[in-house]
Image: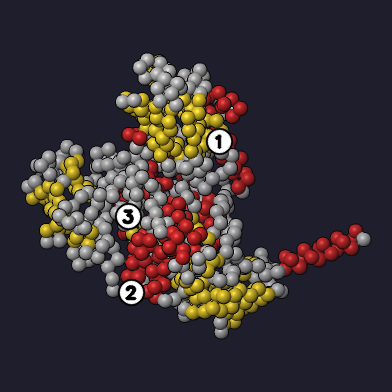
Amino acid sequence: MKKYFLFLLIAFSTCTNANVRLPKLFADDMVLQRNKLIPVWGWGDPYEKIEVQFNKQTKTTKADKNGKWILRLDAENAGGPFELSIKGKNKIVIKNVLVGEVWICSGQSNMAFTVNEAANAEKEINDADFPFIRAFTVSRDVSSLPKDDVKAGIWGVCNKTTVGNFTAVGYFFAKKIYAELKIPIGLIHTSWGGTGSETWTSREAFESSDEFKDMIADMPNVDLDSISKVFNKSVAKRVEELQGSKINPTKAEIFKEFAFNDSAWPEINEPEAWETQDLGEFDGVVWLRKTITLSANEAGKEATIELSKIDDEDITYINGIEVGRNNNWDAKRKYSIPAGILKEGKNTISIRVVDGGGGGGIYGESDDFKITVGEKTIPLKGKWKYQVESVKSDVGPNSYPSLLFNAMINPLIPYAFEGVLWYQGESNAWRAQQYKMAFPLLINDWRKKWNQGDFPFYYVQLSSFNETNGNSNNGSMWAELREVQTQTLKLPNTGMCVTTDIGNPVDVHPKNKQDVGKRLAAIALKNVYKKDIVCSGPIFKSIEIQENKIIASFEDIGSGLSTPDKYGYLKGFEIAGEDKVFYFAKAQITNDKVIIYSENVPNPVALHFGWADDASDNNLYNKEGFPAVPFRTDNWKNVTETVKFKMVK
């Protein structure tokens, strides 16, 4: 009886292994790319004969010795629905297949931002009845080695019940393209919030790069379990060296107490993200402590404490008593301090911060980082004591390079598509100058891997967000990254969507994704679909200095320069002399040029436009309504010159 059962088990296993299998991307309701060869691939038995039928085509191939097979159907015109049939020792039939335009949507949280979260979401959802628009959302996954299939994902047909979970940028792009072309549109959405470009780039690309080859040489070529052990050990060792003590989660509860002695703790600057300081790329739990001194007159009174923003969660204590907690990473913290908590003399603020991934720590404007007692304001910016309670045990998407390429991009290759929509850069702002190499490396890497030529790669320039109060005189990481994004337009078949005017200075996730999608669609309609339209705004060309004035010329002005200001006043322009001190300048449009001057700068040598984290004041457009690209004319020192991507060793 046991032998018979074993025979059945072996027979069943053999039969199961023999079945032809397809990537999860090949499923009911899918969209195939028109006017290009259509790769279809999967797995079966070694040397198994495979037959694929689609529309009026029938093609055959054989699996290789490892059971992998691939063939390419002839190009098809837009249309459908069709059935796609794959036959080996078993048969798979994929139904309701359309042929049209396929776009890959990738990046970080602003691409992951859904229609449910967008402005006017209820109306957008109720109006969503577009059965020819479909989306496939790749489930989040990491891998230290390239995978041949995604973890999970299904195609969704656009309607009221499904569209809420679509990528908002991708959906509004697709909606506009469909309105113009009236052909099926497929979106393949693969993104992860808080991720840097390095995790979306392949190991082979880094190995071929002079900038990154030494870095990638230190990454072990092993499975994720093995790399997790290395990662956890390395992070713990680095943290313990920084703070001069072992990580001990069981002891952490006493860190909130007023009487606890934190004199041996190291210091960190606040508000400032951990990634720019000694802690570096770190996810876990950190305690922050600071002592302030109050007078007898201030003691015992009701007060408020403001902690700007904290990524991701916090519990805040004053003298050991909890005064507030929040788990919204981009919400401003403002907690009431009840009467009787504050004391004459020394008072201790203790904050337990939990960072689950991506950026971490206290960030935002230092003006929002204070205690207010009556009429007195006590700034809290500056050095804080810190101690790590625990390190996040699992490897995150930014822990090592290539993790998301391996798990969320490689499995999509060689699926045929038209182009890529990319919204990312916030997580690279700290090392903006290195993005000059990292971003083009990613684009060229994907193009090489797909071997579809220089396919369209359209991206969203960073919007306006007051990350660090960066400006021309203090330096601005976000402005530097925008500049790098502009420089990347030198790569063939790229396009950039400017969004400084439709962002939100206090929200890194602006809800107006409608205009983002429409602006990306305009680039595609102009360059891919050959519509006779203007698709972008003015871009700086040159300057001429005449005494105390700078005259700026622009390209891509459409039918002319314009501003929505009813008085014709332009904002966002600054000029500086040899002292490198910038002043806001008066600017006006004359004969489709901009004349800029300031009474404070009699001999100008440099011009900035929109050179700030928050560039929402910019109001130079072309008459078609596209905003001008931020720029500078000098090459003075950048604040991100020395910041490089570092891998945990």
Give left or right: position of 371 versus 159: left
Mark 1 closeness class: few <14, some 14–19, many ≥20 residues within 10 Å: many
SS at mark 1?
A: strand
Q: Position of residue 246 (x, y in %)?
A: 57, 26
Q: Secondary structure at mark 2?
A: loop
Q: Quadrant of residue 526?
A: bottom left
Q: Is residue 241 visible?
A: no
Q: Which amino acid, mark 2?
A: Lys
Q: Position of residue 315 (x, y in %)?
A: 50, 33
For the residues labelled 2 and 3, the Cα–Cα distance comes to: 26 Å
Asked whether, in this view, residue 352 is left or right of residue 175, the answer is: right
* Residue where numbered disc 1 is placed: 391
Q: Residue at x 52, y 22 (%)?
A: 257
* x and y percentages locating residue 113 in the rendered image: 45, 55
User: In 3D space, how far apart are the residues under numbered discs 1 and 3 (Cα atoms)?
Assistant: 37 Å
Q: Which numbered mark, 1 or 3, is in the foreground of this view?
A: 3
Q: Amino acid at mark 3?
A: Ile
Q: CA distance from mark 1 to mark 2?
A: 52 Å
Q: Nearer the viewer, residue 540 or 383?
A: 383
What is the secondary structure assignment of the residue under circle 3? loop
Name the mark on residue 530.
2
**Number of marks:** 3
**Residue at position x 52%, y 48% in the image:** 397
- The residue that disc 3 covers is 502
Residue beneath the point at 47% across and 71% down = 130
* Residue located 53% across and 64% down the image: 161
Residue type for callout 1: Val
The quadrant in which the N terminus is found is bottom right
User: 320 or 184, which lies in front?
Assistant: 320
Q: Is the C-beta separation of discs 2 and 3 under 8 Å?
A: no
